Amino acid sequence: MANMDKRDEIVRAALELIAEHGFHGAPMSMIAGRAGVGAGTIYRYFENKDILINELYMNLENRIYPVILEGYGECKPMRERFLHLCTALLRYFIENPLDFRYLEQFHNSPYGVEIRRERILGEKEGCDVFRKLFEEGVANQVIKDFPLVLLYALVFGPLLAVARDHILGFIVLDDHLIAKAIEACWDGVKR
Amino acid sequence: MANMDKRDEIVRAALELIAEHGFHGAPMSMIAGRAGVGAGTIYRYFENKDILINELYMNLENRIYPVILEGYGECKPMRERFLHLCTALLRYFIENPLDFRYLEQFHNSPYGVEIRRERILGEKEGCDVFRKLFEEGVANQVIKDFPLVLLYALVFGPLLAVARDHILGFIVLDDHLIAKAIEACWDGVKR
Amino acid sequence: MANMDKRDEIVRAALELIAEHGFHGAPMSMIAGRAGVGAGTIYRYFENKDILINELYMNLENRIYPVILEGYGECKPMRERFLHLCTALLRYFIENPLDFRYLEQFHNSPYGVEIRRERILGEKEGCDVFRKLFEEGVANQVIKDFPLVLLYALVFGPLLAVARDHILGFIVLDDHLIAKAIEACWDGVKR
Amino acid sequence: MANMDKRDEIVRAALELIAEHGFHGAPMSMIAGRAGVGAGTIYRYFENKDILINELYMNLENRIYPVILEGYGECKPMRERFLHLCTALLRYFIENPLDFRYLEQFHNSPYGVEIRRERILGEKEGCDVFRKLFEEGVANQVIKDFPLVLLYALVFGPLLAVARDHILGFIVLDDHLIAKAIEACWDGVKR
DNA sequence: GATGAATGAGCGTTCATTCAT
DNA sequence: CATGAATGAACGCTCATTCAT
């Protein structure tokens, strides 16, 4: 097993276990066991559990971004771009339920809150397609003139909720329903 | 101190501490300390921590229900009823941030998932105003003909997201913004 | 077993094990085992291992002081007072070898250095009979006009060394030899 | 890098780190890092940590001996020889604080005790100048007729104590004070 | 020979739960 | 009934040592 294989095994095991059982339900020893490595080995790659958790998150973001940006045309109409991004995101969640559940765990934790705080208050523009989309939409009077945070809530709120319910088996999202759901989100934010 | 006083103190202390520090940041001994009772006493009223957590949730629901139902007229127009319920709920969250944060903790945990599973699959009709409202709205063709779960997502998703962001200080929800946000939710679900 | 019995058992076990095996050779679990209590019980009485170690030291000092001060007359001649204190101290060490070895461990550790630093630089006069004795001796020109620290070294250096060697069995200190050793110390510091 | 260079680097690194942080504050990996070798390499030269620690000590002794023997005339008067040896030793400690602190760590540990036991009980005569000096002094009735171990205590006790206090900054030993201190030691052992 | 990734026993510490008082 | 001292399994993490390369 090569070096990066081992690191990858740890990452995979951690993702799986944390997604399934939450941060506190996934002890380092269990992660090590699932990854097929010794308990101490994890610490060669990640200084401590917090850092493992954070790197896992960064990892995930970097995997998702290219996927939802595939085929995304900056010059298409606003609505179409919105539907593209949301559909791609929701599809990603549905097809990668472990990733989704990990993201959920992360967001609902001090880690995630801190990341959001930095993002929102830090004015780190440019690094976020949705932000650009919303700001342009507001400027063009296509989207309601709401604070960015509220627009986020109106879109990601339903998106995440519906993804979770699908993964939990409370609803079955086929292509038709996905389209409907996302159009409803658009109805919520469009002027 | 009467029996029920003691129980109430425990419930109050647990709510506060869990809302502030999460389930794992609120040891039973700390809850006992805050409640002014012995550690063992909690176990006279609640078999174990899980059961305390669950009862706390039931408790909370029972407190919220009457509040949002106050002034709720079953005979008013659909839209008005929707706005009333959502506004009351969002206001409650904003005015009772501890309650809200507890609910959040609860929802994002195995406990919450189980409760939802029972609710949704268990067909427990009647006990939920929103359900009745949505079903009536769908029947009257005022609300989109979506599965109930999706309608929930479209409404509670943004509502909870925006309440959290307000409590975290990412946005300041005044009456005007609350109204706007809830109208946007209505835009999302209305036909 | 009463409360204080338990605390005392922990103190006794910790003293024994640390005296025998050093701080690092005496894990908390081993201390608990020897004390006949659960591992967690120690933490009811001592916040952590460092605090246990420090309290143990304070404890020891407070036990030694009264013993060496027994029969100590402030008005007797300098030499006699010196002999009294040193003899009492050395005897205490010989009769309480665990106490002695614990003190040694403590002194040769960051803990002990810090304590000494505070004592020496902190000018906390009065709390130390030896200090008073030496200062008076210097003032009366009975004792060499050396810095206090040097006088300490000339007295405690041999005293501790000889106590250690006795306990390790390298020498057998009878009353005669004790007297000789301490007189030699006096020869070292007297004018 | 030749073989012996590597070994020397390991010895140097171990000495530095153990002197600064103690045996338990100097993990093998840290020693390897400081020495610029792989962690496993240490084990080619030293079977395990204990053996490294012991060899380090032997090393140190072999370095100190020639230094204190430089200019030492076996035929000079007893007192002069005593002053020479002690002064050279104390100076060495002051000029090589890392060596001194290592020695201290070593002496106050099971390793050091074992070494002393072998030395004292093993009757290994000849290998120790101080021993020869004291035995001759006792025979000539220049030095008190005490057991060797006691004479050691009366000399090395103060010497080590005062060296430690200097290195810790509790006292500043200049040439004058060094001379005074050692004369006081002489007063302690001389007839 | 040299390496450093891998190991896992063992550490200090926490906390849900029990039970003698 | 109520207490809170006691428990011990389980946690995150360290580090002496091994061994495939």
Image (cartoon, coloured by chain):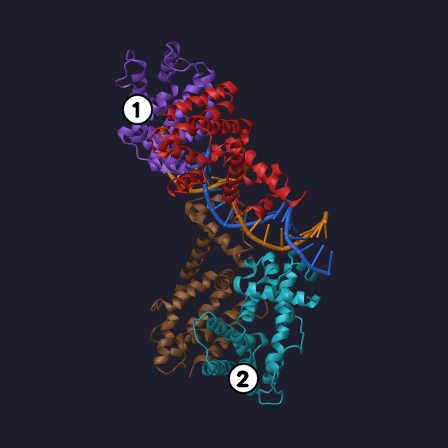
Chain colours: A red, B purple, C brown, D cyan, E blue, F orange
Q: Are marks 2 and 1 on the same chain?
A: no
**As drawn, C46 above or below A167:** below
Task: Compare residues A67 and B155 and report the one nearer the observer.
Answer: A67
**As drawn, C109 above or below D151:** above
Please state, as top left, top right, bottom left or bottom right, where the N terminus of chain C lies in the image. Answer: top left
The residue sitting at 44% across, 53% down in the picture is C51
Identify residue type, mark 1. Answer: Thr
For mark 1, what is the residue?
Answer: B87
Q: Picture coordinates of residue B33 (x, y %)? A: 36, 38
Task: Compare residues C24 and F10 and report the one nearer the observer.
Answer: F10
Tally of numbered discs:
2
For mark 2, what is the residue?
Answer: D83
Q: Picture coordinates of residue D32 (x, y %)? A: 62, 59
Q: CA distance from mark 2 to mark 1?
A: 93 Å
Q: Chain of mark 2?
A: D
**As drawn, A104 above or below A122:** above
The residue sitting at 45% across, 50% down in the picture is C48
Residue at the farthest front position: A75
Q: Nearer the viewer, mark 2 or mark 1?
A: 1
Q: Chain of mark 1?
A: B
